[in-house]
Amino acid sequence: MRNTHDIRTLPLWRSILFVPAVSDRFVESALRQPADLLQIDLEDSVGPAQKEEARERAKSIADRFFAAGRQVSVRVNRPWRLLVRDLEAVVRESVLAVALPKVPDASFVQQVAEVLAELEREQGLTIGHTRIITMVEDAEGLTNMNEIAAAHTRVVGQIVGAEDLAVSMRMNVDDDGLYVPNVMCVAAARRAGIMPVGFIGTVADFNDPEAFRARIRRARKLGFESAFCVHPNQVHIINEEFAPSAKEVEFARCLVDEFEKEVGGGRAVFTFKGRMIDLPVVDQARQVLLRHAAIKASPNA
């Protein structure tokens, strides 16, 4: 298992915006959005008759996004015959990751990683260039979530696919049904040292911005730090809510400074602004400062 305290190798992807490969309008719109990651979609937004066209278009779209200085991923298809064709098309310098839908277990991830390595060799890319976001979307994947998150060093993030999971579990797409799977996702991701991606709710609900903001704010409280989005209006909400506020940063900075003074005076526990402070609280503040510094250094800051 990788070191869960080493976050240096993980990308900073707060907002991951879906871009249907067959829509010129969405491609043009995506370039105007401050999403951390533009995710070209070959799966649910593409009909069966359009799969080949979408696969071919994804190459030029990815290259165009990359040339514009954007980070790019591709959501591929799950059936193996479609999946292999997708990977053959999109493993290239401009694509930093693939999102794997309906991941059943760790062995599936490992098999995909083997295919990626073969394709990277053919393309002259560094082995490991193409990272993986795992999507847990059925009861089998839910059972194997911990093993999936830790399946391979290529895996950088994990998400629960609400709609597909609801079909598999025969449950409603609501907070009651999705709470436990999402908390499990956070725990599995943190254990494996990868990004927990998501929030409790459906990605398709974008008509109420304030309700969506509340969902993302709740997701951050639960430990998430990234989310998929299907509409440009969701991007700035995700970026804001998955970043520490100015007030949080100032509080954290003052707390850490005070801790250094108290430790210098031989005290490990002290009171700060009416709250008892010990090392775990200080570590939380340090995490806020590290997150803030990383976001400020990112291209979309």
Image: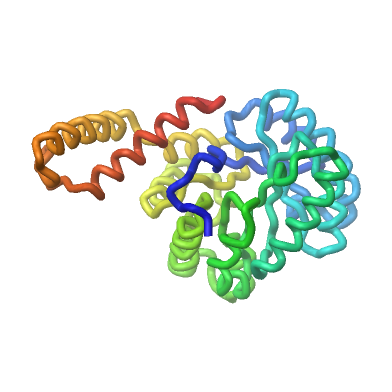
Would residue 240 be visible to someone looking at this image?
yes
**Where, by quadrant of the figure, is residue 180 drawn?**
bottom left
Scheme of colours in the image? rainbow
Q: Is residue 129 left or right of residue 250?
A: right
Q: Is residue 256 left or right of residue 184?
A: left
Rendering quarter of residue 233: top right
Q: Is residue 14 left or right of residue 116?
A: left
Q: In the rendered picture of this protein, how many numbered marks are placed on residues?
A: 0
| Residue 248 figure quarter | top left
Answer above or below: position of 210 versus 301. Answer: below
Q: Residue, x 10% and y 42% (percent of image)?
A: 267
Residue placed most toward the observer, 154 or 165: 154
Rendered residue at 41%/52% (across/down): 223
Please name whichever residue, 6 or 90, is drawn nearer the observer in this view of the structure.
6
Expressed as whole percent of the image width and height from the top left, the position of residue 253 reads 26, 30
Residue pictured at 24% horizontal, 46% vertical: 281
Location of residue 283 with respect to 178 vertically, above or below = above
Q: Is residue 234 visible?
A: no
Residue 274 lies left or right of residue 256; in this view the side is left
In the image, residue 142 lies at what x, y percent? 56, 70
Eyeballing the image, is 225 above or below 232? Answer: below
**Which of 34 and 259 lies nearest the eye of the viewer?**
259
- Front-most of residues 52 and 23: 52
Q: Position of residue 92 (x, y in %)?
A: 80, 39
